Image (tube, rainbow, N blue to C red):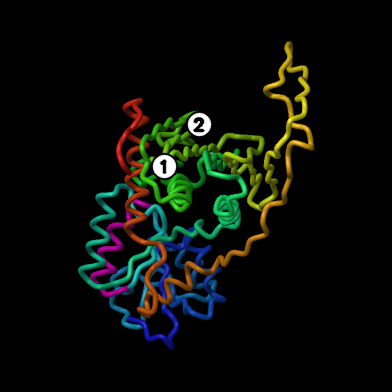
Amino acid sequence: MVDTADKVRLVIVGYGGMGGHHSERLKNNSLYTIKGVYDIDPARGEAARKNGLKAYASYEEVCADKTVDAVLIATPNDLHPFYVGIFAAAGKNIVCEKPAANTSAEFEGMIAAAEKHKTVLTVHQNRRWDKDFITVRRVMDSGILGKALRVESRVTGGNGIPGGWRKLKKHGGGMMLDWGVHLIDQLCRLTSSPIGRLYCDYSYRQGHECEDGFELEMTFKNGLSAHVTVTTDSYLPQPRWFLYGQKGSATVTDWDCRGRIAVKREYDGEIKGIAAGNGFTKTMADLPDAAVAGYDLPDVETDYDRFYNNFAAACARREQSEVKNAEVLRVLKIMEAAKRSFEERAVICEGL
């Protein structure tokens, strides 16, 4: 347990891309002292030393160091359950990178280990504090669009599956575990309704054993529908978010939160048709300016250090973890349902 006056003395386990990212983020956070890192790759240990950090020789050394309050696990996904069990037994509080585990059953075991040893276990679902997501939530909660009918969430890129191990099933690779875990978590934050039905299709266009993208369709029991697109071979940008409501629509086009809100006005004027390819349409014609009120997206603030600050407070037993393990478990079960939908080519109809 950490005294409220003390910094959290932290070791980063896995000093690759994400471990290095956490190190940079935390080195200027007044609530933390980075005691060092542990990585099975000697080259990464040497990199840590060059960056002024202690390189622990083994996880046993980390466990035995009584000056270490907490660990942050940033290893390949398949190693998370092992390390959580080890460090929980040693009495260390734990941040685990997402996805917490490859399966919901594994994560249930991790929760049990933390509860048994009375340690804090929380998962790095940091994208709950992304500005684009906070913007979407603000628009939906404001009621400006009326009742929310549909949410479309897209993350697209053209660089393929990143990193070596993320292409391998045994390590928990694939875009569902890599990005789906965030995007589904965000959607579950937009509504408390259970999911009534779900359908998912994976893509393997790049020839890897893990999916390089997916299309996920969900309908919640309150009537809200949601579509999630993840691609790694899209060479033109697609809008990050598109919202449909009874009264209007909104788009957030990118991470920088460019976009627009459009609300339909009462209008009894004539809709003029337009030439549409080799035909004519009124249905799909743009609404005249008099029929639509346009608004800027709200300018929201978000605290990108909130996850870290909350973990420090949880270690001191001053706050509960904002990322609840029950929420993490639900997302894992939804991802498992998505995989089953793809494998069975079936719509999954169960409360999730």
Q: Secondary structure at mark 2?
A: loop
Mark 1 is on which residue type? Asn
- Label disc, if present, on residue 206 of the rendered structure: 2
Where residue 255 appears, as percent x and y from the top left, is: 63, 51
- Label disc, if present, on residue 9 of the rendered structure: none
Task: Look at the magenta stretch and give its main secondary structure.
Answer: helix
Apparent side of residue 85 relative to residue 37 in the rendered image (left or right) = left
Q: Is residue 41 visible?
A: no
Quadrant for residue 291, please give it: top right
Q: CA distance from mark 2 to mark 1?
A: 37 Å
Where residue 69 appears, as percent x and y from the top left, is: 36, 78
Apparent side of residue 347 relative to residue 33 in the rendered image (left or right) = left
Tell me if residue 318 is in the magenta stretch.
Answer: no
Q: Where the N terminus falls, by quadrant?
A: bottom left
Q: Determine the residue located farthest toward the left in the rendered image.
A: 116
Where residue 290 appears, as percent x and y from the top left, is: 78, 37
User: What are the residue bounds of the magenta stretch?
Assistant: 77-92
Mark 2 is on which residue type? Gln
Q: Is residue 226 visible?
A: yes
Q: Secondary structure at mark 1?
A: loop
Q: Mark 2 or mark 1, which is nearer to you?
A: 1
**Reading the chain from its start, which is encountered first: label 2 or label 1?**
2
x 36%, y 55%: residue: 327
Apparent side of residue 304 relative to residue 82 in the rendered image (left or right) = right
Q: Where does label 1 land, which residue?
A: 222
